Amino acid sequence: MTDLSHDAPPEELRALRPDEAPPALPAGLRDAVAGRIAADRGPLAWLRSRPTPQRRALALGLVALSVGSGFLSLKGSPTLAVVLGAAAAGGAWLGLRPLHRPPAPAPLRWAATLGALALVVALAFGDPSAAPAPVAARLRCFVPGLSLALGVYALWRALSRHPAGFAAFAGAAAAGLASNGFLAARCGAGDWAHLLLGHASVVGVLLALAFLLERAMPPR
């Protein structure tokens, strides 16, 4: 008996029904698709059109450049900076998953998003014996850290073909972790209040931003 399962290619099905014409496209669909393709031009469209391995390589290079810039004024922990950079690279990689591939397992999705926030919060309390920083200095890393994270996230979104859902949060967490890697290299402070308010909070702000952007997107 001939197999008519959904796995049969369209050519086989047409050969089995030679008298039937292919279904007509809805009126205006072809013109609408052509119009959207024609409108998708410019540098951002060129970036999104790159093959996934190239987009992932650009994202990994962006993370490496961000973390590595902290080594130019090394005062902190290079080991911690590399660990945070590796975590950021993993999130950026997952967030640029090809659209035709199945989603990442749920534990991996949680680890790449809320797990990133839990990691930097836990690191803030890693050295309870550290001398407390002056109150005025507890936020001194927040502005440069957030500025870097916003730049990384904007460029990551430029590389993403569909920055929504899990991908958007993974990209935001990756940007926050890359910024924390940068701060871990250049900042030698160990005070938990400084690390929490000036470093870890950057990841929380980026995840909140991803949530707001997700809410602002039209229904799919």
Image: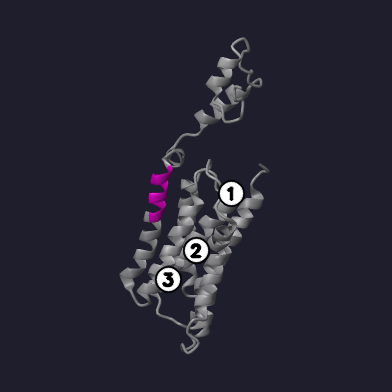
In depth, the one of 20 and 209 nearer the eye is 20
Q: Secondary structure at mark 3?
A: helix
Q: Which residue lies under the disc numbered 3?
A: 183
The part of the chain drawn in magenta is 52-60
Image location (x, y in percent) of residue 100: 53, 40
Q: Is residue 92 left or right of residue 79?
A: right
Displayed quadrant of residue 23: top right
Numbered circle sitting on residue 176: 2
Amino acid tagged 3: Leu
The quarter of the picture where residue 207 lies is: bottom right
In the rendered view, would you say 53 is above or below 9?
A: below
Q: Is residue 141 magenta?
A: no
The residue furthest right is 219
Number of residues whose C-alpha sits closer than 10 Å to that of mark 1, classed few (under 14), some (14–19) or many (20 or more): some
Give the Cα distance between marks 3 and 2. 10 Å
- Provide residue 123's location: percent of width, then percent of height: 49, 76
Three-letter code, disc 1? Ala
Q: Which residue is mark 1?
A: 164
Q: Residues within 10 Å of mark 3 (few under 14, many from 20)?
A: many
Labels 3 & 2 near each other (Cβ < 8 A) = no
- Place of residue 211 in the rendered image (x, y in percent of width and height, measured from the top left): 62, 57
Q: What type of secondary structure mainly makes up the magenta span?
A: helix
User: Mark 3 vs mark 1: which is more N-terminal?
Assistant: 1
The residue mark sitting in front, 3 or 1, is: 1
Residue at left offset 41%, top offset 69%: 83
**Circle 2: residue type:** Gly
Name the image colouring.
Answer: one colour
